[in-house]
Image (spheres, helix red, strand yellow):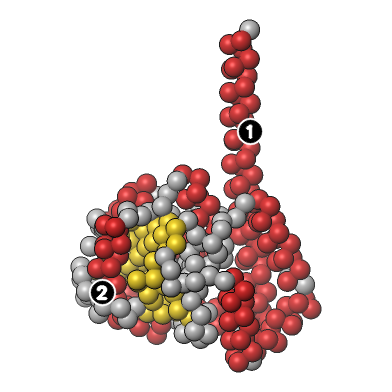
């Protein structure tokens, strides 16, 4: 059985389309919708809509706790109440049209047992393949370069320039395509140990048993998958990208409803990203500190033994 966790916020039409697409997939599937405290009452509407549907459970998160904790709310429920072979976490603006999607997941696992798996994620807006996001994970040096870039991009003038670009769908679409092309990532090839896109990610049972709340909880939005890749690297978990499975991503549906102003939306993204980068830096520094303490402790014991 595969459990699908959909994080819902305001965009009820998108959520219903996501649910419908999952129901059309082959296999034994359950759906858990987490309403992240939507202020428009759509959580209650979803409860009423699916109250007699044995395949769909709607959870009302009392707080809008963001991407990581909102999804963790759903995955924790799944692991406490179901026995899934895999857990698929996906945004409410994602649809799956590949009927054998679930069968392919199992096929990929039998070929190479994974902890985390990412599908090909195609942006409906720009046509770009959004996963993998990056072939190499972050360390403190590259993280701090990213922080500096975000600081520069958060300047009011830079936000205005970026907002102006986003006001034109044609220009913004071209900008996204240029940005993706610069990465030189061939999404038609499988990869291992890369940063996956968070719009849709699959966790195996073995990983979920160890991590029923798989996302680092000290972020609100953005950079969650970069942190997840770093955590996987620390414990030797297997993270795969495989284009044999694919989803469609409509992008920005919830934030568009929350922020009508593109300038306010851009500022929200930068503020959240800045906070997430700070959380990631603290996590890495804590790991570095523990490693130094371990080395010093080991060195001290060796010196004591010599004397």
Q: Residue at x 40, y 50 (%)?
A: 211
Q: Is residue 50 visible?
A: no
Residues at circles 2 and 1 in contact by the CB criterion of under 8 Å? no
- Disc 1 element: helix
Report x, y in % for residue 27: 21, 70
> In this figure, which residue is indicated by the disc labeled 2?
100
- Disc 2 element: loop
Report x, y in % for residue 240: 41, 60
Q: Which of the 4 image quadrants contains residue 201?
A: bottom left
Report x, y in % for residue 46: 34, 77
Quadrant of the snapshot with the C terminus = top right
Report x, y in % for residue 72: 42, 58
State the separation of the CA atoms marked 2 and 1.
48 Å
Q: Residue at x 50, y 60 (%)?
A: 194
Q: Is residue 211 visible?
A: yes
Tag of residue 77: none
Q: Earlier in the sequence, mark 2 or mark 1?
A: 2
Q: Is residue 194 above or below residue 167?
A: above
**In this rendering, would 226 be left or right of 205?**
right
**In this rendering, would 184 be left or right of 77?**
right
Mark 2 against mark 1, which lies toward the viewer? 2
Q: How many discs mark residues in the rendered view?
A: 2
Q: Which of the 4 image quadrants contains residue 152?
A: bottom right
**Toward the viewer: 67 or 166?**
166
> In this figure, which residue is indicated by the disc labeled 1?
292
Quadrant of the snapshot with the N terminus = bottom left
Q: Residue at x 36, y 58 (%)?
A: 203
Q: Which of the 4 image quadrants contains residue 112?
A: bottom left
């Amino acid at each position: 059985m595969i459990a699908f966790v959909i994080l819902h916020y305001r965009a009820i039409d998108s959520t219903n389309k996501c649910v419908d697409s999952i129901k059309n997939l082959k296999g034994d599937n359950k759906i858990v919708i987490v309403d992240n405290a939507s202020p428009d009452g759509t959580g209650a509407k979803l409860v009423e809509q699916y109250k007699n549907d044995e395949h769909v459970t709607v959870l009302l998160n009392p707080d809008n706790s963001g991407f990581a904790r909102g999804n963790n709310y759903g995955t924790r429920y799944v692991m406490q109440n179901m026995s899934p072979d895999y857990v698929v976490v996906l945004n409410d603006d994602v649809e799956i049209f590949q009927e054998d999607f679930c069968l392919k997941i199992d096929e990929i696992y039998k070929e190479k047992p994974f902890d985390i798996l990412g599908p090909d994620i195609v942006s409906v807006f720009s046509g770009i393949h959004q996963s993998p996001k990056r072939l190499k994970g972050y360390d403190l040096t590259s993280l701090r370069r990213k922080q500096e870039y975000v600081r520069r991009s958060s300047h009011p003038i830079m936000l205005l320039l970026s907002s102006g670009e986003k006001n034109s769908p044609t220009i913004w679409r071209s900008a996204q395509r240029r940005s993706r092309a610069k990465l030189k990532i061939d999404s038609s090839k499988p990869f291992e140990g890369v940063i996956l896109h968070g719009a849709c990610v699959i966790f195996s049972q073995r990983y979920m048993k160890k991590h029923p709340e798989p996302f680092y909880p000290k972020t609100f939005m953005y950079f969650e998958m970069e942190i997840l890749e770093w955590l996987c690297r620390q414990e030797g978990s297997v993270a795969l990208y495989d284009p044999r499975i694919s989803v469609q991503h409509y992008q920005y549906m919830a934030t568009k409803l929350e922020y009508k102003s593109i300038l306010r939306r851009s500022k929200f993204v930068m503020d959240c990203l800045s906070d997430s980068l700070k959380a990631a830096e603290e996590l890495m520094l804590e790991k570095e500190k523990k490693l130094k303490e371990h080395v010093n402790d080991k060195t001290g014991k060796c010196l004591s033994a010599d004397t």
